[in-house]
Image (spheres, rainbow, N blue to C red):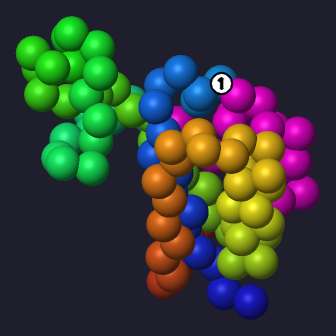
């Protein structure tokens, strides 16, 4: 089965819970990258005063590459463990991956 890139976008207040969950499943996620981001647009709820002033909401991005079946299992696990957590995700095919 081909590899895919799973990208997860989430509010900063749940990133530790998500990373802890991913770390419990090295069979599905042998590694991942976390980075900070800013959420913009009509789909992003601005709640805190600072968010309203700046016009964006702090978000975390987690990316991981691997077999599609494993990444779909991660999505199912997140749905089960964190229902309503406001995690946006997408899967895209990976043409090539490796270490240099």
- Residue 29 seen in render: no
Residue name at image x 72 percent, y 50 percent: 78
Q: Residues within 10 Å of mark 1 (few under 14, many from 20)?
A: few
Q: Residue furthest top?
A: 49
Q: Is residue 44 left or right of residue 66?
A: left
Give the secondary structure at mark 1.
helix
Residue 22 is situated, as x and y percent measured from the top left of the image, at 76, 43
Name the residue beneath numbered marker 1.
16
- In the displayed structure, 80 sits above or below 37; it is below
Total residue callouts? 1
Q: Position of residue 93 (x, y in %)?
A: 51, 81
Give, as a single range, the part of the protein colored magenta: 17-34
12 or 62, which lies in front?
12
At 69% from the left and 61% from the top, the residue drawn is 75
Give the residue at x 33% y 26%: 58
Q: Quadrant of residue 18?
A: top right
37 or 14: which is nearer to us? 14
Q: Quadrant of residue 57?
A: top left
Q: Is residue 39 visible?
A: yes
Q: Is residue 38 magenta?
A: no
Q: Looking at the image, is 79 positioned above or below residue 86? A: below
Q: Is 24 one of the magenta-colored residues?
A: yes
Which residue is painted at 29% across and 21% down in the image?
A: 47
Residue 49 is situated, as x and y percent measured from the top left of the image, at 21, 10
Along the viewing direction, whichever of 72 and 48 lies nearer the viewer: 48
Residue 29: % across, % down: 77, 54
């Amino acid at each position: 089965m081909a590899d895919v890139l799973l990208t997860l976008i989430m509010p900063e207040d749940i990133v530790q819970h998500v990373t802890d969950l991913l770390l419990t499943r090295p069979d599905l996620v042998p590694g991942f990258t976390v980075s900070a981001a800013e959420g913009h647009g009509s789909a992003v709820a601005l709640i805190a005063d600072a968010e309203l002033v700046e016009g964006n909401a702090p978000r975390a991005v987690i990316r991981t590459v691997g077999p599609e079946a494993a990444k779909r299992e991660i999505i199912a696990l997140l749905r089960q463990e964190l229902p309503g957590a406001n995690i946006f995700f997408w899967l895209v095919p990976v043409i090539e991956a490796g270490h240099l």
